[in-house]
Image (cartoon, helix red, strand yellow):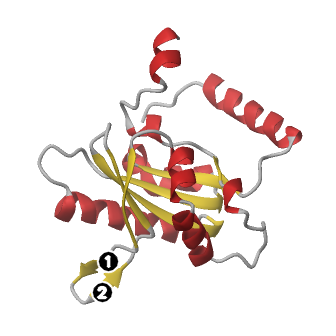
Amino acid sequence: MLALANEGQVAARPQDAIKDPYVLEFLDLPATHRLVETRVEEALISRLHDFLLELGSGFAFVGRQKRLTLESDHFYPDLVFYHVKLKCYVVIDLKVDKLTHGDLGQMLMYVNYYDREIVGPGDQPTIGLILCADKNESMVRYVLDEKSKRIFASRYKLQLPSEEELRAELRRELDELQAPEVKP
């Protein structure tokens, strides 16, 4: 506990660097069905310092809309960071709706591309993070399976949660921690 108080959380594994949910209240965006991904991305870039604080320690900004080319097709992950403590790239994709299996497949492609084309000697495998308005945990487990240790789907909130929402989230986290781990 003393080390945690003095040094903060030490990220040794990808799971240690990823939070769920992220609170993006500092963006001052309305929680509306008309919100589009580019608006969230532009707000994050304009408030990059605040976003880096919300992500946690160790994140360094690499770029936005970094083009990946596969034959003649181009793809653009929303944000790319490098985690200096974990020594790996972190590719972030933003989704304003509920997470879909297509979003997970797209992130899997981004992570595989970075691992095969960008990662250098001494780098650890790439982490993928999908920031979405809502997610289905079961779908994440079934789509990703063994890749789930490197690809994460985290919810974001545009306002701090209410007291009732905090209680429900704490109950969910406690239930998850107390559930016996299922071995494959």
Q: Please give the label number shown on residue 73.
A: 2
- Asked if 162 appears above or below 95 in the picture, the reply is above
Q: How many other residues sit within 10 Å of disc 1, few (<14), some (14-19) or many (≥20)?
A: few
* Residue 140 at x, y percent in the picture: 53, 54
* Residue 153 at x, y percent in the picture: 54, 53
Q: Residue at position x 59%, y 74% from top? A: 37
Image quadrant containing the C terminus: top left
Question: Please, what is the three-letter code of the amino acid marked with disc 2?
Answer: Asp
Q: What SS does tag 2 mark?
A: strand
Q: What SS does tag 1 mark?
A: loop
As rendered, which of 3 and 100 lies closer to the eye?
3
In this rendering, which labeled residue sits more in front, label 2 or label 1?
1
- Asked if 97 appears above or below 61 in the picture, the reply is below
* Residue 154 at x, y percent in the picture: 57, 51
Question: Please, what is the three-letter code of the amino acid marked with disc 1?
Answer: Arg
Residue 25, by quadrant, is: bottom right
- Asked if 168 appears above or below 133 in the picture, the reply is above
Q: Is residue 53 visible?
A: yes
Between the residue at mark 2 and the residue at mark 1, the CA separation in whole angstroms equals 10 Å
Q: Residue at position x 50%, y 9% from top? A: 2
Q: Residue furthest left?
A: 121
Count of numbered labels shown in the rendering: 2
In the visual, does 76 lie left or right of 172? Answer: left
Q: Residue at position x 40%, y 74% from top? A: 65
Q: Please give the label number shown on residue 67.
A: 1
In the visual, does 181 lie left or right of 26? Answer: left
Q: Residue at position x 20%, y 56% from top? A: 119
Q: How many other residues sit within 10 Å of disc 2, few (<14), some (14-19) or many (≥20)?
A: few
